Amino acid sequence: MFTAKQWAFAGLLLSALLNSSTAAAAPACVDLFKPSQKQSLEARVKSTIKDIIQNERSSKFTDHFTYLATKEVLNRKFQNLLDEAGLSVRESWKGFEILPEGTHPLAKMTRSLNRMGVRVVISIDLWAKGAWGAFDVSSRTLFVDYNTVATGKVDLTMPHEIRHAYNEMRSHFSEGSYERVFQTKFIAFDMPNQRLPGMKGLYEAYFTLDEILAHRQSAVLTLRNLQRNPLDEQMMEFAKKHGERLKQFADSGLSILTGLKKIVEAGNHKFTLSQEAGTDVVGVGIVVPHSRALLQELANDTVAASLLGLKAEVSVLQSELPADFNKKSMQQLLLSKLDTTIAELEALHPSINEFFEATKAMEQASPARLAAAESALRRLSETIAQRRKIMQLAEQTLQ
Ligand SMILES: [Zn+2]
């Protein structure tokens, strides 16, 4: 459990990062390496990361002893470079865990995240697999993105991942009911090239609805950058990508949830329970094996026709579990959770669509297009704030 003080600190940390997160926004706050040696240190960090990845990739073709010896040397070199940048780490099975020591900005950030039970890890393996940064809910680990480590500048990915961490943490509290709704996860399973209905790319086999909340925030930062530099092509690409993804999460989420509701109503599912360690949150899994019901309700596109099974998980507080625990009472709980989640997604859908349309045609961030995207995003943010408030008020009335 977290104390109120730590809790408030999380909010502070997040807002501090949001205000200083982009290189263009606040250059004074974002240099993580010593300025005098920045160039050479940056180049050395990058080339060492490249060598580590190369060694991993060639491990199949080299003899094991050489691979291990090279790995050992490179890991030590990398650790020394981080040390030179003022960052202490310890090797763990997941990569290099950042220690909360010293005045380096990442160390300071680690200090406050550690207090909230979140570890901060540099995982080169993860970068080699094509992911930038990540937050792993089950191990409560925040994986730092490549750019932040390689260039010494806090990248846009960091605030996104910290937002996931923050939302997950809020979802553990009774007042975090809104965030809890968005902890709903979908997993396609049991097939090669598994894909969720309507999903493409990075999130096709697994995603959490929390991506909607985190992508909204990334979109805000991206548009803020575009306002400052309307010709930044990379930011324009990001804005479009956020629009596409937000729409994908909302569309796919709605269609999966609607299908799931019918499957649960008909009783064509199994459920599982998993307690999240150290919290009052229970993950209720809805498992739908490959069946006619699954195909009928969820195979509304050609991709899902090859979906062999689906698992969804909703987060509930332990106190919400029925006292008379059986399939029927769990079915009722699940149906009410699915209804709530569908209603929340429906509430956000219009402004997400509007944002998608506004960013789709963004060849050039003209003032008019930027204004349209901003106003759609503002509407989305306002709707989220309102819905969260309504849900909290309802909670308080019930208590
Ligand atoms: Zn994310």
Image (cartoon, helix red, strand yellow):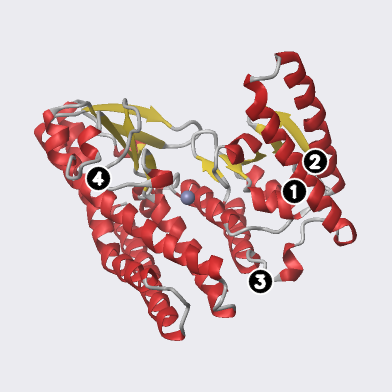
**Which residue is the site of mark 3?**
24
State how far apart marks 4 and 2 are (Cα): 44 Å
The disc labelled 4 sits on which kind of residue? Lys
Q: Earlier in the sequence, mark 1 or mark 4?
A: 1
Instruction: Please name the amino acid that badge 1 sits on.
Output: Ala
| Disc 3 to disc 2, C-alpha distance | 27 Å
SS at mark 2 in the image = loop
Question: First in sequence: mark 3 or mark 2?
Answer: 3
- Image quadrant assignment for residue 71: top right
What amino acid does circle 2 point to? Ser
- Figure check: 256 above or below 349: above
Instruction: List the residue tagged with mark 4.
Output: 337
Label 1: which secondary element? helix
What's the mark number on residue 88? 2
Label 3 – label 1 distance at C-alpha: 22 Å
Badge 4: how crowded within 10 Å, few (<14), some, or many (20+)? Answer: some
Image-based side of 126 in relation to 186, left or right: right
Kindly state the secondary structure of the residue where label 3 is placed.
loop
Q: Of the residues under marks 2 and 1, which one precedes in the sequence? A: 2
Out of 168 and 363, give the one closest to the viewer: 363
**Residues marked 2 and 1 touching at CB (< 8 Å):** yes
Q: Position of residue 348 (x, y in %)?
A: 30, 63
Residue 120 is left or right of residue 280, and the answer is: right
Mark 4 or mark 2: name the one nearer the start of the chain.
Answer: 2
- Say whether disc 3 or disc 1 marks the residue closer to the N-terminus: 3
Q: Which mark is residue 107?
A: 1
Considering every residue shown, the one lying at the far left of the view is: 266
Number of numbered discs overlaid on the protein picture: 4
Q: In screen coordinates, is 202 left or right of 51?
A: left
